[in-house]
Image (cartoon, grey):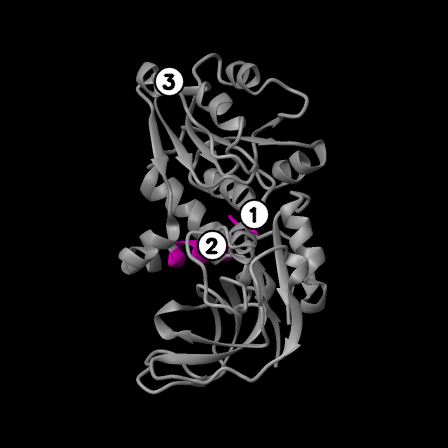
Amino acid sequence: MKALLCREFGPEANMKVEEVEDPVLKPGHVLIDVKAGGLNFPDLLCVRGQYQFKPELPFVPGTEGAGVIAEVGEGVDGFTAGDRVLFNTPTGAFAGKAVIPAQSLTKIPDAMPHEAAAGLTIVYGTSYHALKQRAGLKPGQTLLVLGAAGGVGLATVELGKAMGATVIAAASTDEKLAVCKAHGADELINYSSEDLKARVKELTGGQGVDVIYDPVGGDFTEQAFRTIAWDGKHLVIGFAAGDIPKLPLNLPLLKGGHVVGVFWGAWAGRFPQEHRQNMSELFAMFEDGKIKPHVAGTYRLEDFLEAFNSLSGRKAIGKVVLTP
């Protein structure tokens, strides 16, 4: 089978697409013909050796995907060959086949394309967990989404609207903001040309925002926190800007604010039943037309470098997908 191989930590350009042996099926696992793999920011960090864990070299990157079950291993119940599924995995999605533990699989609706399914688990799973379990977002509250045109950002715009919030989308270009508007954003802020704090104050009548969704970090974190309402929650998702910010602690004190960490992968592992319930609710939203995964670009495995560059350069609007 074809697979994207990382043989040494470093720039993405060091990787190659190679012919390798098919993975061996194990008890409790299934063999999947992979149709699409979702590219995420942690994949970049993993290849560069900068992520929380370092896989043993060589490895196939890719933490989520979708496909069709080719064969079911011993001891697996509830799945059969031919089932359409999505999966999450520490590594291995950017290949023609993958062997995945059965507990990491979820059947997908017939109406959901593999490309959309491949980009659902992490971005929508992260965002829904953040808004539901970590922020307790309520109808009528105001939600500020930074990096709103990225994968998790755009998912959060849709989910915020589905949950009844007023959504303020903040992004770096008018093109990105137009996509946010099409996916349900109520208000738009171009933080390349507008003052974030002043604009939020104007839009909220001086009250500030109840929940901030922050996958960006860098200088935007403090700017955003200064817009928070009393007892508001600032969700720490990631640091796409590159720098991990240092927030002056007098700001949470003065606003009665909460800085809330969101580590969806660890939470899903600790609370699998709640994660499955979240996924079930996400599928229902998809079937009701409340969420529409936006695929920014679909790339062949051989064009992986273009895909990685679109994400690292923050050019992608929505989700980037690789197809073997």
Numbered tag placed on residue 251 in the rendering: 3
Provide the residue span drawn in magenta: 279-292
Which residue position holds label 2? 122
Which residue position holds label 1? 151
Is the residue marked by circle 3 packed among few (<14), some (14-19), or many (20+) residues within 10 Å? some
* Kind of residue indicated by mark 1: Gly
Task: Decide if residue 113 is in sight here.
Answer: no
Per the image, label 1 sits on a secondary structure element best described as helix
Q: How far apart are marks 2 and 1 (CA)?
A: 9 Å
In magenta segment, residue 281:
yes
Q: Which of marks 3 and 1 is nearer the N terminus?
A: 1
For residue 61, side relative to residue 234 (left or right): right
Is the residue marked by circle 2 packed among few (<14), some (14-19), or many (20+) residues within 10 Å? many
Per the image, label 3 sits on a secondary structure element best described as helix
In the image, residue 87 above or below residue 126: below
Q: Nearer the viewer, residue 33 or 293?
A: 33
Position of residue 2 measured from the top left corner of the image (x, y, whole percent): 63, 77
Q: Nearer the viewer, residue 129 or 237?
A: 237
Per the image, label 2 sits on a secondary structure element best described as helix
In magenta segment, residue 9:
no
